[in-house]
Image (cartoon, rainbow, N blue to C red):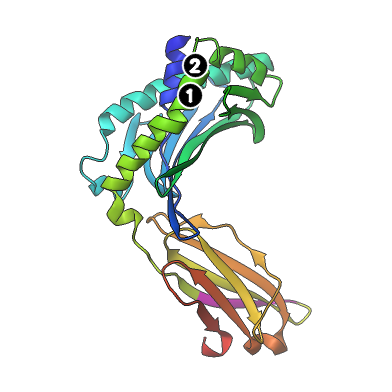
Amino acid sequence: MGLLTTVFLLLMFTGTTMLKESGIRCYSLIYEDVARSHPRPGQSNFTNTGYLNGQVFYQYDSKNQRAVPSPPWDKVKGMHDWEKESQFQKRREDFVLDNMQNILDYYNDGNGSHIFQGRFGCKLCGDNFIKGFWKCQYDGRDFIEFNTDEKPSWIPLDPAAHMIKQRWEASPGAVYRAKAYLEEECIGTLRRYIEYGKTHLRQLIPPTVKLSHNSSLEGNLTMKCLAHHFYPKEIELNWLWNGKVQEKKVGEIQPIGDGTYQTWITAEIPSSKKNSYSCHVVHESSFESLVVNWAKE
């Protein structure tokens, strides 16, 4: 049990998010586990994805059992020992799937497919550690999370989670090792990644903005403002009508796959007012807001 707990603590981190708060640049390292059960023996699978400032920098898949760095991180020499990471993730795969089987046994449910997700990491702003976190879900509902207070512990959020809590806290000092991992080892790894990847992490890529619309049966227009291929992730979009901010529906900020992001906003307006609307975009890559007018499209 002690070995399994140690493996669980070591294997759950690979990702980041870059924020700008009060002029201070922030970085994050996040790892995400996804285990999927299958009623047929040997068909369950496991993936682990690392995010550095919101960018995927590696992925592990139980099918090929290798941790594969993603562009541009595959070109950063000395950043990580990927062979060692592959071996580590294989041990983590065994541990996570074993815990998932325990959950299935608890609910006496070996039929169908189920999903266990774990997400954990740390955040650093300037020279100050901000926080570490570790949360898990089962079939989309909160399952268990780690409390990093002075007396750390796993907090069960599901009936089966009480059993998992007992397993993960069975080894003496396990919760303190988990706390130390989040607040010390994770931060140390993040600092090292920032140094190796500073060329990529500190780049500013301005968004490309495009306006489009669709007509509705009522004679109104559904307007869409799409911002894409920008970095870092944080961005704000608004509709302006005669200089005033209007109501909007906001799309999720999504990674494109090349290290940049895209998002959009929509609004329903009378077609006669189309040329009075503009899309207002605020992004770190520019000191001034970008304004795209319908009349210029």
Residue 183 in magenta stretch:
no
Q: Mark 1 points at which residue?
A: 178
Badge 2 density bin: few <14, some 14–19, many ≥20, Cα 10 Å = some
Image x and y of residue 116, in percent: 57, 29
Majority secondary structure of magenta residues = strand
Badge 1 density bin: few <14, some 14–19, many ≥20, Cα 10 Å = many
> Which region is colored magenta?
210-216
Image x and y of residue 119, in percent: 52, 35
The numbered mark at residue 174 is 2
CB within 8 Å, label 2 to label 1: yes
Image x and y of residue 129, in percent: 45, 41
| Outermost residue to the left | 77
Which amino acid type is marked by label 2? Ala
Q: What element carries label 2?
A: helix
At horizontal 63% and vertical 76% (from top left) the residue drawn is: 239
Decide which of 237, 174 is in the foreground and name it. Answer: 174
- As drawn, 164 above or below 74: above
Decide which of 154, 111 is in the foreground and name it. Answer: 154
Is any part of residue 93 visible from this angle? no
Decide which of 266, 241 is in the foreground and name it. Answer: 241
Q: Distance between the residues labelled 2 and 1?
A: 6 Å
Is any part of residue 44 visible from this angle? yes
